[in-house]
Amino acid sequence: MNRFVAVGLLLAVSAHAQQFKCPSKDGQYEDPIQCDKYYECYDGRATEKLCPDGLVFDPTIRKINKCDQPFNVDCGDRVELQQPKGNSLCPRKNGFFAHPDAAVCNVFYNCIEGEANEITCTSGLHFDEYTGTCVWPNDAGRQGCNPGTNKKLKDGFTCPKEQKTDEAGQSVAHPKYAHPTDCQRFYVCLNGVEPRDLGCQAGEVYNEETERCDAPENVPGCEDWYKDSDEKKH
């Protein structure tokens, strides 16, 4: 960089810092427009600082280091950020980032100073950049994901793509489904994607309402399931 350009930039940064009015108390304070910029104030003088690339400043943290992951910080109107200094796997030097192939939704990278550490979500989950965690596909809301080959049982059953939710609207981890023709049998989808064919013990049928095995007389349509024999032949 040209020496005169470098000096000019330094003066511009210094001038910007001088424009920031320090509160009476020494400490670290956020920039009003840039979320990863802050000021260290000492004796009324402001020194401009930047968080490591990928992190943003959180004035509410009661620590000396107030830079944190963006999904943990409410930047409000502080929408500007420093120029990224990342690479192909790490768009910024620090943070959690999705796989560069948009179809790969279950793999992400934890980037620390530009070094990418690959992490694979638990089976059936997708990475969500807004929380930095693995969540159910419906919660992630990502498009174009390649679900791979859905596992299919011998009778043709595959786990539904739509996640089953409970009364509180939360995704059920291992949803159950009644067999369409056999009152005694039911399916469990482990992590929502891995089907298992299970059955109730002799004399009981699957109750879709309670999601438990129950007496036939308690399940409409299955009252006579064991009428002709101790165990229905199938």
Image: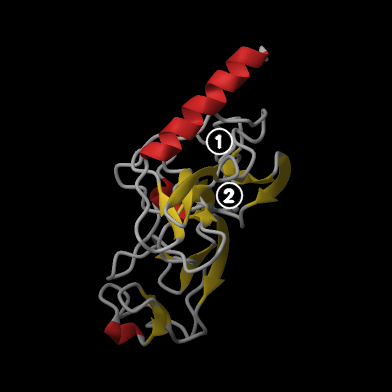
**C-alpha gap between disc 1 and disc 2:** 17 Å
Circle 1: element type: loop
**Mark drawn on residue 106:** none
Q: Which residue is mark 1?
A: 146
Amino acid residing under circle 1? Asn
Q: Residues within 10 Å of mark 1 (few under 14, many from 20)?
A: few
- The three-letter amino acid code for the residue at tag 2 is Lys
46 horizontally vs 101: left or right: left
Callout 2 secondary element:
loop
> What residue lies at 45% left-to-right and 74% top-to-bottom?
184
Whether residue 207 is visible, yes or no, is yes
Q: Nearer the viewer, residue 170 or 210?
A: 170
Quadrant occupied by the N terminus: top right
Q: Which residue is mark 2?
A: 152
> Compared with residue 91, is residue 193 higher up or lower down, i.e. above or below?
below
Residue visible at 47% across and 76% down? 232
Q: Position of residue 161 (x, y in %)?
A: 44, 48
> Residue 104: x and y, percent?
59, 37
Against 188, residue 149 (above or below) is above
Residue 222, how many percent across, how many down? 32, 75
Residue, far front: 43
Kindly indicate whether the residue at mark 2 contacts the one at mark 1 (C-beta within 8 angstroms): no
Which one is in front in this view, the residue at disc 1 or the one at disc 2? Answer: 1
Q: Nearer the viewer, residue 5 or 73?
A: 5
Q: Is residue 23 left or right of residue 49?
A: left
Give the mark nearest the N terminus, 1 or 2: 1
Name the foreground residue: 100 vs 234. 100
6 sits left or right of 133 in the view: right
Residue at left offset 61%, top offset 57%: 122
